[in-house]
Image (cartoon, grey):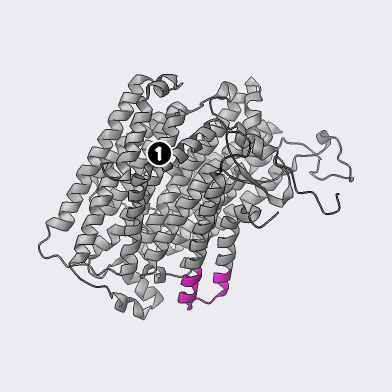
Amino acid sequence: MTWIDHLIIAPILLPLVTAAVMLLVGERRRTLKATLNVASTIALLGVAIMLLGQADAPPATSGAATVGVYLLGNWPAPFGIVLVLDRLSALMLVLTGVLALASLVFSLARWHRAGTHFHALFQLQLMGLNGAFLTGDLFNLFVFFEVLLAASYGLLLHGSSTARVRAGLHYITINIAASSLFLIGVSLMYGVTGTLNMADLAVRIPAIADEDRMLLEAGAAILGIAFLIKAGMWPLCFWLPTTYAAASPPIAALFAIMSKVGIYVIVRVWLLLFGEQSGTSALFGSDWLLYGGIMTIVFGSIGVLASQDMTRLAGYSLLVSTGTLLAVVGTGHTSVTGSALFYLISSTLAISAFYLLLELVERGRVVGADLLAVTMEAFGDDDFAEDEVGIAIPATMAVLGISFICCALLLAGLPPLSGFVAKFALLTALFDPGGLKAAPNATPITAWVLLGVIVGSGLTVLIAMMRAGIKTFWAPINRTVPRVRFVEVTPIIVLLLACATLTVQAGPVMRYMQDTAASLHLPHGYVNDVLSKPAIPGKGAQ
Amino acid sequence: MELIVAIAIGVLTSSGVWLLLRPRTYQVIIGLSLISYAVNLFIFAMGRLRMNMPPVLESAAAGDPALYADPLPQALVLTAIVISFAMTALFLVVLLAARGLTGTDHVDGREPEA
C-alpha cells in the first residue's frame, strides 16, 4: 500500500497526534500551539480535498459508487472496524475543514486566549468529527461521538462564565442521556442481527424473522432519537438555542456542524439500513422524520420571531434548517436527497458566518464584554484588555452591514445567494412529477404543507433578520464603531464568498450531490465494496 | 434468569430517570450513574445470558459456538464503562464550577422563587 491508500486515516490520526504534541508543550507557549493548530487544520483541509477528489473519481467498472475502504487492523469487514470513504463522507470532511479553519482564524484574534487547552481541544474535536464521518461501524460511531462530545464540553466551557457553565451543565446532561439511548439502540440492533458493521446490517436486515423485526425497529427508533437530539428535532431541541448562544463565537460557529452530524448519521444509517430495497422494514420511520421536521420548522420560525437576542435568533434559524433537512429526507426520494445535501452545505456555512459576525456586531454595543471579566480575574491574563487593537474606521460598519445582509439573504433563502438555489432545488425536487408520484411516502397534501412551511419559515427568518438589522445598523444614533481586526473579518468574508461560489458553481455542485444521493439510495455498491475488501496478505503468506 | 436481569435493569432505569428529572445537580449525577449501570447490564444481556461459560476459547481450535459466551457485548460494556466514567468525572467538575459561580446547587442556576 502506498501512502495514498493510507490517506483515509489521516483525518483521524493527524489531529490526535497534534493534540498530543500540544499537551506536551507548556501552557504559556500559545503562539507555538496556535501555529501548530493552524498548520494541522490547513493540512486537514488539504487531505479532505484530496479525499474528495478520490471519492468523486469515476468508477473503474460501471457501478453505483466508488467507495474507499480502509480495514483497521487488517481484519476483513464484518469482523473488524472499517473506515469508509464515499462521496458523502468526503463532502462532510471538506465542510468540517472549511468551518474549522474559519473559526480557528477568527479565534486567533483573542478568543483562543480566554482559557486553557483551547488548541488541543479544538484538534480533538476535529478528530471526533472526522472519525464520525468516516466510520462504517455503529459502535465505532458511538466512540467517535463521545470523543467529539467530550471535546465540545471543553470548548463550550472555554472562557468560563456563569452563563456558559449553566448552559454547559444542561448540555452535558442531555448529551449523556442521549449517549445512553445510543447504547441501548446499538445493543438492541446487535442483539437481533448479530453484527455492528453498517454494510453487514444492510445485508442482514431484510432477512430478519418477523417475530424479531419488532425489536430491530425498536432499536433503530431508540438509536434515531439519540441522533435527533443531536440534530435538534422538535421536541428534543429546547437545549440548542441557549447552548449555542452561550458558547464563545468561534465555538458556536464550529458547533454549527455538530448538529449536522446528527443529520449525516440519519441520512447514512437510515438510507443504508431502511432504504426502499430493504424488505419489510423499508422506509421505517419516514413519517416521523417528515412530521417531526415540519414541527421543527414551525417551532424554529416562531422562535426566530420571538428571540430578543441575535445569538438566539441564530440558534432558532439553525433549527429551521435542521427541520427542513429532516422533513425532506423523510419524504424518501433520491432527487430530494441531493437537493437536501446542497441545502445542508449552504445553511451550515451561513450559520457559521452569522455566529462569527454577531460577535463583531455586538461588540459595537457592549463595551468591554462582561463575559470576559471573570476570565480576566481567573486567569490573570493582564495583556487581555490591551489587545483591543482594531481599526475603528467607518468602512467597518459597511463591511459588517453587507455581511449581515448576505447572512440574511442566505438564511431566508432569497436570491442571489446559495440559500435561494438550495431552497429552489428542494421545492422543485419535491414537486417533480416523476419524483412525487413515485415517492412511496409523501402524499400531495403533505408536500403542499411542507412547501408552505418551508416558504413561511423563510418569511419569518427574513422579518426577524430585518428587525435585528435595523435595530443594530440603522436606528442607533450614538453608535460606537466596533474595533475589528482583519483576522476576524476575513473568515466571515471567506465563508460568505464560499456561499457565493456555491451559487455560481451550482451546476457542478448539484451534479456531485445528485451522484451522492444516487449512491445513497442504491447502497449495493457501498455494501459490496465494504464486505468484499480483502485483507492485505502477510509477508510470509506467499 | 432473564426475568431477574430484566427487573433489575428496569428498576435501575426508572430510578435513574426519576433522579435525572430532579432539581439538584447531585441527584442528576446519581441518576445518570444509575442509568449507565442499567445500560451496561442491558448491553451485556444482549449477548444472551449464559451460566458458567467464559468468553474465552480453551484450546487453539475454535470450538462449538454454543459452548462459549459472546465476547463482543462484553467488550462493548467495557468501552461504555470507561467512557461514562470519564463523563461522570467531567460532569462533577462542572457541577462544582456551577456551585461556585452561581452559589446554589439548583440545576437552573438560581433558586426558584417561592
Q: Chain of mark 1?
A: A
Q: Vertical placement of A392 versus A281: above or below?
A: below
User: Principal SS element in the magenta part?
Assistant: helix
Taking the spot 60% from the left edge, 52% from the top edge, the residue there is: A8
**A5 relative position to A437: left or right:** right
Mark 1: which amino acid?
A: Met
Q: Vertical placement of A282 versus B21: above or below?
A: above
Q: Is residue A24 magenta-colored?
A: yes
Q: Vertical placement of A317 versus A48: above or below?
A: above
Q: Is residue A122 visible?
A: yes
Taking the spot 55% from the left edge, 42% from the top edge, the residue there is: A182
Quadrant showing the N terminus of chain A: bottom right
Return the x and y of residue B65 as percentages of the image width and height: 81, 35
Say which residue label 1 marks. A233
- Of helix, strand and loop, which one carries label 1? loop
Give residue A210's quadrant in the image. Answer: top right
Taking the spot 19% from the left edge, 61% from the top edge, the residue there is: A398
Return the x and y of residue A120 as percentages of the image width and height: 51, 66
Give residue A333's quadrant in the image. Answer: top left
Q: Is residue A165 visible?
A: no
Q: Vertical placement of A454 versus A45: above or below?
A: above
Count of numbered tags: 1
Stretch of the chain drawn in magenta: A21-36
Q: Is residue A425 magenta-colored?
A: no
Residue sitting nearer the eye, B92 or A413: A413
| Mark 1 burial class by Cα count in 10 Å: few <14, some 14-19, many 20+ | many
**A508 relative position to B37: left or right:** left
Return the x and y of residue A140 as percentages of the image width and height: 61, 47
**A506 relative position to B39: left or right:** left
Q: Outermost residue, left direction?
A: A477
